[in-house]
Structures are given as C-alpha cells and as structure tokens.
Image (spheres, rainbow, N blue to C red):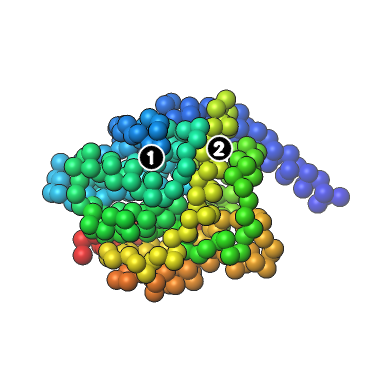
C-alpha cells in the first residue's frame, strides 16, 4: 500500500514539475527573432529553387586573427547557438569562426516547399564562404552537420583544409534496416511533439538518462516552437530534412574523402534514425558509436579517431574540455 502511494505521489510530482516547466516555456518566433544568439547574427540572401531565402550566420573574427578559418555546422535538432563555448575557445586561438544556420533551421528561412539535398545545403554554405571571401577553411560538422560536412568536403576539397566530424549521423545506412516512411509520416510525427516528448528523447538518446539543468535550453528551443501558430511550417521543414537524411546516405563515399579528417566520437552515443520502426533485436544493432567510429576511421583515408568514453551524442556540450582539446590539437598540427 505504501509503495503504491509513493508511486502515485511521484507521478503527481513529476506531472506538476512538467506542467510548471511547460507553463514557463517561451513562445518562439519562426525565425527565432525573440531569441538572442551568443554573437551578432548577419543574413545572406539566397535565390534557391526560384525563391528568395535568408540564411542567418554568425561570423566571429578575433583581434589576433592570422588567416585561420573554421566553419561549424549544426545538427538536426539544433542551430548555431549551441556552438557558443566552441566559438569562444576557437577565437581565443586566433580562428575566424563562421557558423551558419542552414535553411530550415534556427534563424534562417523556413520555406513552404524546398527540395532538400545535402548538395544544396553544401552549395549554400559555399556561397556564404564566397561572399565572405574565404578561400580555405576547416569544416566541422556535428550530427546531421557531419553528413553535410562530409558532402561539402567531397564537393569542395580545394576549400576544405581539414574535416572534423563530431558524432556525425549517417555512419550507417538506415535504409537497410528501417522501413521507408513518406514525408507526411515524419510531418505528422513532428506535429505531435511537445516539451515532455522532446526532453525524453534527448534524455534517453543524448545523455543516457543523466540530465543537467544546462541542457534545458536546447529542449526549450525546440519546444518553444510548438507554441507558434506557424509550427506546421516548421514541422514540414523538419519532415523534409528527415527524408533527406534517410534517403541520402554518405557512408558509401567515405572512401572518396581526400582531406585530412578527425573523428571525435562519444562512445556512449546510440543515435540512429528510425529506431522506433524496427524490432528490439534490430534496434540493438543500430547507432553503436563505439563500433561505428572505428569502422569509419578505417573507411576514411588519412583519418584520425579520438574516442571520448562515457559521453553521448554531444561531446562539445557534455564534455567540452576534452572535446575542445582534441579539436585544437588537431587543428594546430
């Protein structure tokens, strides 16, 4: 009886805390106009697929700049803001740091219709670097940004001085295990999202059920959009990019990368697209970064692997000091 009562009290308390958090959730503009980034944001106007779009970006140049550049590419559930500490550390080392929000993300345009490809996003990023007169740069991509960074390095090796992949997704081809779902399925899935669901996903998949208050802001950035009357547009873009990720693997082209490459892998990561669509047995074989990092290092010529034990999908958030040391050491080689 006492156990049942305690369980009931815990459920009530959890619900009250969750409701309190939701009540405090800030409404966010579709282009995050009411959310301040850690550094000044500028805008590049692009004509893409017969429509005018805006690409937001941060361009942070230190006083001790000596011609070294690096581009930071965000993941699927993020935007450029989560690179704050990375930008600060890199500028301290004299790097000019360029951090775009890809079309469909963050402060950039959310078009009603766009054929998303990694090639298109890479070309947009190249246009940004051309506009900024940057001819050479290191390219760092996290999560989905790792797939984009890989595509960029394949398309523009003459620009890419070094490629850095931080827990990139796409180290395996999910199409071989996960049944295809149309864009409409991903869209309806996005429409169902709320604060509780977003936090639970990040808690389980990113942080191994070990939550810290510092992680709240990354949940709030996604959950705040669910309060927006334009959330359908945000969800549609999210669905299109899920389809891009699922149908456009880069894993088969790792062997074609010609630039020096660093893999920074949190080995506790289990991120994989479509886990909820497969059996428990299949699910156990997906997203095994402790194995995928090693396989990818063997596949990419002239590559180096740095594994960070007991760290999940976001080394630059969860264990920043270890991440930044590995990154700067590699850049300075």
311 vs 110, nearest the viewer: 110
Residue 295: x and y, percent?
44, 72
How many residues crowd mark 1 within 10 Å: few (<14), some (14–19), many (20+)?
Answer: many
In the image, residue 150 sits, relative to residue 231, either above or below, namely: below
**Secondary structure under the numbered disc 1 in the rendered image:** loop
Q: Is residue 317 left or right of residue 173?
A: left
Residue 131: x and y, percent?
23, 38
Q: Is residue 178 left or right of residue 221?
A: right
In the image, residue 276 sits, relative to residue 240, either above or below, namely: below
In this view, the residue farthest toward the right is 1
**Secondary structure under the numbered disc 2 in the rendered image:** helix
In the image, residue 123 sits, relative to residue 274, either above or below, namely: above
How many residues crowd mark 2 within 10 Å: few (<14), some (14–19), many (20+)?
Answer: many
Q: Is residue 296 left or right of residue 127?
A: right
Q: Residue at x 73, y 39 (%)?
A: 12
| Camera sees residue 196 | no
Q: Between marks 2 and 1, how big is the CA–CA gap?
A: 17 Å
Q: Residue at x 39, y 66 (%)?
A: 254
Q: Which residue is mark 2?
A: 236
In the image, residue 186 sits, relative to residue 35, either above or below, namely: below
Q: Which residue is mark 1?
A: 101
Residue 284: x and y, percent?
62, 67
Mark 2 vs mark 1, foreground winner is: 2
| Camera sees residue 29 | yes
Q: Quadrant of residue 252?
A: bottom left
Residue 327: x and y, percent?
30, 59
Mark nearer the N terminus (2 vs 1)? 1
Q: Residue at x 82, y 49 (%)?
A: 4
In this view, the residue farthest toward the front is 50
């Amino acid at each position: 009886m006492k156990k049942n009562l305690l369980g009931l009290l815990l459920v009530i308390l959890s619900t009250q805390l969750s409701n309190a958090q939701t009540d405090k959730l800030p409404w966010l503009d579709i282009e995050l106009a009411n959310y301040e980034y850690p550094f000044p944001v500028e805008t590049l106007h692009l004509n893409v697929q017969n429509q005018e779009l805006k690409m937001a970006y941060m361009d942070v140049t230190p006083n001790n700049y000596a011609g070294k550049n690096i581009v930071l590419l965000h993941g699927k559930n993020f935007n450029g803001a989560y690179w704050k500490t990375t930008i600060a550390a890199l500028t301290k080392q004299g790097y000019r740091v360029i951090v775009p929000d890809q079309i469909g993300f963050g402060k950039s345009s959310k078009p009603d219709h766009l054929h998303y490809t990694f090639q298109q996003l890479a070309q947009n990023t190249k246009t940004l670097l051309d506009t900024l007169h940057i001819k050479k740069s290191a390219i760092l991509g996290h999560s989905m940004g790792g797939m984009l960074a890989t595509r960029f390095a394949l398309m523009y090796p003459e620009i890419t001085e070094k490629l850095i992949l931080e827990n990139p997704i796409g180290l395996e081809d999910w199409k071989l295990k996960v049944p295809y779902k149309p864009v409409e399925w991903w869209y309806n899935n996005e429409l169902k999202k709320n604060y509780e669901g977003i936090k639970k996903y990040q808690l389980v998949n990113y942080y191994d059920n070990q939550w810290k208050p510092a992680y709240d802001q990354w949940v709030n950035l996604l959950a705040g959009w669910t309060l927006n009357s334009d959330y359908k547009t945000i969800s549609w873009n999210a669905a299109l990019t899920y389809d891009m990720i699922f149908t456009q693997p880069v894993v088969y082209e790792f062997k074609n990368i010609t630039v020096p490459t660093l893999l920074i892998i949190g080995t506790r990561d289990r991120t994989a697209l479509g886990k909820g669509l497969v059996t428990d047995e299949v699910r156990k074989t997906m997203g095994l970064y402790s194995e995928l990092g090693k396989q990818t290092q063997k596949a990419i010529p002239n590559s180096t692997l740095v594994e960070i034990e007991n760290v999940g999908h976001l080394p630059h958030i969860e264990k920043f000091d270890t991440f930044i040391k590995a990154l700067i050491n590699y850049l300075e080689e």
